[in-house]
Amino acid sequence: MTVAVRRPARRTVRRLIESPRAHPPRGPRRGPSTPVAPVASRIVTLNVPSRLRLRSAVVGILRRERLARSRHAPYAPARLLVLAPVITPARNPPRTPAGRRLSNLGNNILDTAALSAYIGGMESKQPFPQTLIEAVRHFADLDVALAALVSLRWPNGVRCPHCESDKVTFVASRRIWQCRNCRKQFSAKVGTIFEDSPLGLDKWLPAVWMIANDKNGISSYELHRGLGVTQKTAWFMLHRIRLAMQTRTFGKFGGDVEADETFIGGRSRFMHHEKRKRVIKTPGVWGKAAVMGLLERHGPDKQSTVRLAVTKSLRKAAIQDNIHKNVEAGANLYTDKMRSYQGLEADYIHGVIDHGEAYVRGKIHTNGLENFWSLLKRAIKGTYVSVEPFHLFRYLDEEAFRFNNRDDNDGGRFVNVLRSVIGKRVTYKALTGNDLPQTC
């Protein structure tokens, strides 16, 4: 039997066939009188989608060949001859991150430092799907899902997360790497939100796609039904993905900036009368969480950007401290007539709109933030129904990410979240507050 494979896999195939560990199938021992059938040579072309599946493909062919001959000659040997590589180049050869055309790299694109060059050189025009149905089908193959995560995490080649060495060996049977420098094993999940998760990437990546692109979010019960996991697991998955959706930036807003606040919580008229007596002591806002919002109109990317923070108080000290941390001096600041905003004229061009008289006066208004509050409360009331104040900031991060990336398509938002999973991790104990000091 002759097998035509790609050239970068020569050593892998020869080691697989010539290794003494390649045992024959089980059966009665061959005696001296057992005939051995002659080996028939035929050509089988392997069209493996990735290097990860080469070993399993060759093993499958050899097993089938030996099984077909075992009825006549149980232990007939199988020969393997590596021929020239069989590769169909893409119509439009993509470029590597360094800008070189893949057509100039030859056929051995698996040997390049960038694994993304191999993914881009496959016959698919788009390395990542663009719709939900394409994502489910595309990432159903664990090897394809792993290649997608590896290409985003290590665009210049796989490196050990423990010692940063590039001398690593891939263990295809377990989909992990062995570092030849520190001798430690690691997977693509190490150091990400997927770490220590028994679920495969074929479930994680569709979950990332749905929460990143569903405008009103997705509940844990809906994810539990869609992926076939428990509701508790789905709830944990969503909070881990929300951690990757956090926007961490140290830049300050400039130009035209709106500031406003809102309250998140249930209405008193929907409360049980016993809870209403216990929570609401005097007229006013009770039992709700206060959220402070800032919106920069038409920023550097020509779209409005929002930042949110859960605040314990709406007094002047807390409100103005948040503004000074996130808005540069000299910017145009537009607020309503709440007393906590008084005194900002010294650092900002402060425009005030009294909602008792009007909602817009030229450029002075807070309608941009009012629009965002409607999107936020529609997601909370319609999808999540009830949100604990302990987890409220996670839901704010989720809604702010979708709002700030609304001009991108579904595939772009998915890739942005997947790039942000590195270096972030939350455990179930920390998520449920069990690692906090317990008091009576």
Image: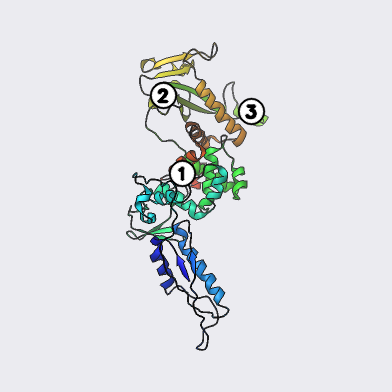
Of discs 3 and 2, which sits in the foreground?
2
**Mark 3 and mark 2: span between their CA atoms?**
36 Å
Question: At numbered mark 2, what does the secondary structure look like: helix, strand or loop?
Answer: helix
The structure residue drawn at horizontal position 52% and vertical position 37%, both measured from the top left corner, is 391
Residue, disc 3: 277
The structure residue drawn at horizontal position 54% and vertical position 26%, both measured from the top left corner, is 373
> Where in the figure is residue 85, as x and y percent of width and height?
41, 61
Q: Look at the picture and state if 205 lies above or below 370.
A: below
Q: Look at the picture and state if 356 lies above or below 104.
A: above
- Residue 13 visible at all: yes
Residue, disc 1: 418
Q: Nearer the viewer, residue 243 or 205?
A: 205
Q: Nearer the viewer, residue 232 or 148?
A: 148
Q: Label 2 neighbourhood size at 10 Å, few (<14), some (14-19), many (20+)?
A: many
Q: Earlier in the sequence, mark 3 or mark 2?
A: 3
Q: Label 3 neighbourhood size at 10 Å, few (<14), some (14-19), many (20+)?
A: few
Of discs 3 and 1, which sits in the foreground?
1
Circle 1: residue type: Leu
Circle 2: residue type: Ile
As drawn, the label of residue 278 is: none
Residue, disc 2: 323
Callout 3–callout 2 Cβ contact below 8 Å? no
- Residue 175 visible at all: no
In the image, is 157 to the left or to the right of 418? left
> Where in the figure is residue 133, as x and y percent of width and height?
57, 45
